[in-house]
Image: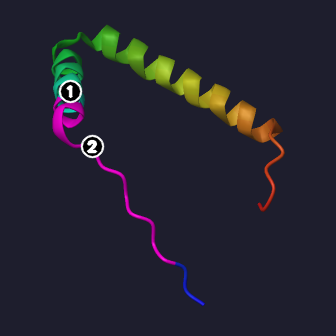
């Protein structure tokens, strides 16, 4: 028996425009940042992923 595929939610209207504007600002800020700022951002991102991996490693997720 097949299950129906749920629709994929998408942003529309003003919410979509706001999201796109913020994404563009962030991208432009990244492009204009110094190498030191880019390195710091990459380290912060890696630290966040390390914390996430730690949390997931101790989670009791059923079905895996």
**Cα gap from disc 2 to disc 1, whole angstroms:** 10 Å
Q: Is residue 49 magenta?
A: no
Pick the front one: 54 or 59: 59
Question: SS of the residue at dot 2?
Answer: loop
Q: Quadrant of residue 37?
A: top left
Q: Which residue: 49% across, 17% down?
A: 44
Say which mark, if any, is on residue 11: 2
Q: Which one is earlier in the sequence, the residue at label 2 or at label 1?
A: 2
Q: Which residue: 48% across, 77% down?
A: 4
Residue 28 lies left or right of residue 40; in this view the side is left
Residue 53 lies left or right of residue 26; in this view the side is right
Q: Tell me residue 8's x, y (percent).
A: 37, 58
Question: SS of the residue at dot 1?
Answer: helix
Q: Tell me residue 49's x, y (percent).
A: 57, 31
Q: Which residues are magenta?
A: 4-17
Q: Residue furthest bottom?
A: 1
- Is disc 1 surrounded by few (<14), some (14 to 19) or many (20+) residues within 10 Å? few
Q: Quadrant of residue 25?
A: top left
Pick the front one: 7 or 60: 7
Q: Which residue: 33% across, 9% down?
A: 36
Q: Which residue was labeled with disc 1?
A: 18
Q: Which residue: 78% across, 62% down?
A: 63
Magenta: main secondary structure:
loop
In the displayed structure, 46 sits above or below 60; it is above
Pick the front one: 24 or 3: 3
Q: Is residue 11 magenta?
A: yes
Pick the front one: 26 or 49: 26
Q: Quadrant of the C terminus?
A: bottom right
- Is disc 2 surrounded by few (<14), some (14 to 19) or many (20+) residues within 10 Å? few
In the displayed structure, 27 sits above or below 37; it is below
């Amino acid at each position: 028996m097949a299950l129906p595929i749920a629709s994929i939610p998408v942003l529309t209207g003003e919410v979509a425009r706001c999201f796109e504007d913020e994404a563009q600002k962030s991208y432009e800020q990244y492009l204009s940042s110094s190498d030191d700022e880019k390195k710091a951002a990459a380290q912060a991102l890696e630290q966040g992923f390390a914390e996430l991996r730690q949390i997931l490693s101790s989670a009791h997720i059923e079905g895996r």
